[in-house]
């Protein structure tokens, strides 16, 4: 069970960060950042499996790969934005975290425009 490894790493990193927070706060933040990166690489293989499954489904359903790749980019932006914002919040910089989240939302909206246009085009074709 890989989740046990992920949770164990998170708990160990949290304990180390709490212990070091008073004496060396810069190390405390670095522990959280390194733990997050390690956990990301631990689950990266699972993300690749999900991407392969979605690619197979899209090819069977004859869905344009452009739309699927855009959706994956949007999901990636959301995860990276959340990770960056949480790192900033852990460092006590909630203002910067809010700016990161705003940037992520804007980028998601920009990427979603082609999908929204295709949806609107489909709706106008259906309506008499």
Image (cartoon, grey):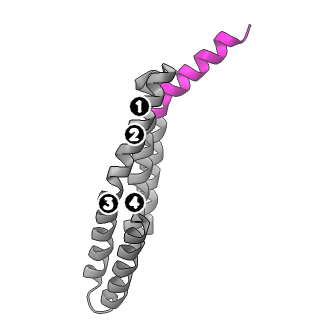
Q: Position of residue 124 (x, y in %)?
A: 65, 13
Spatial CA distance of label 1 from label 3 is: 22 Å
Spatial CA distance of label 1 from label 4 is: 26 Å
Mark 1 or 4: in front is: 1
Q: Position of residue 93 (x, y in %)?
A: 40, 70
Up-down: is 2 above or below 112? below
Secondary structure of the residue carrying numbered label 4: helix
Which span is picked out in magenta?
A: 111-128
Residues at discs 1 and 2 in contact (Cβ within 8 Å): yes
Q: Which residue is mark 2?
A: 51
Instruction: Single out the residue that lies furthest toward the right.
Output: 128
Secondary structure of the residue carrying numbered label 3: helix
Q: Earlier in the sequence, mark 2 or mark 4?
A: 2
> What residue is rendered at 34% in x and 66% in y?
36
Decide if residue 123 is in sight here. yes
> What residue is rendered at 43% in x and 66% in y?
3
Mark 3 or 4: in front is: 3
Secondary structure of the residue carrying numbered label 1: helix
Number of on-image labels = 4
Q: Position of residue 102 (x, y in %)?
A: 46, 51
Between residues 4 and 10, which one lies in front from this camera angle?
A: 4
Q: Quadrant of residue 9?
A: bottom left
Q: Which residue is mark 1?
A: 55
Q: Earlier in the sequence, mark 3 or mark 2?
A: 3
Quadrant showing the C terminus: top right
Q: Which residue is mark 3?
A: 42
Q: Which residue is mark 4?
A: 83
Q: Earlier in the sequence, mark 1 or mark 3?
A: 3
Q: Crowding at label 1, few (<14), some or many (≥20) Cα neighbours within 10 Å?
A: some
């Amino acid at each position: 069970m890989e989740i046990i490894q992920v949770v164990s790493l998170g708990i160990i990193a949290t304990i180390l960060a709490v212990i070091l927070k008073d004496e060396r706060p810069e190390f405390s933040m670095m522990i959280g950042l390194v733990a997050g990166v390690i956990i990301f690489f631990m689950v990266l293989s699972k993300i690749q499996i999900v991407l392969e499954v979605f690619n197979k489904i899209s090819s069977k359903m004859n869905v344009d790969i452009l739309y699927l790749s855009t959706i994956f980019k949007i999901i990636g932006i959301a995860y990276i934005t959340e990770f960056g914002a949480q790192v900033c919040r852990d460092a006590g910089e909630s203002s910067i975290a809010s700016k990161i989240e705003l940037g992520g939302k804007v980028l998601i909206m920009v990427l979603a425009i082609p999908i929204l246009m295709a949806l609107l085009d489909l709706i106008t074709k259906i309506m008499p």
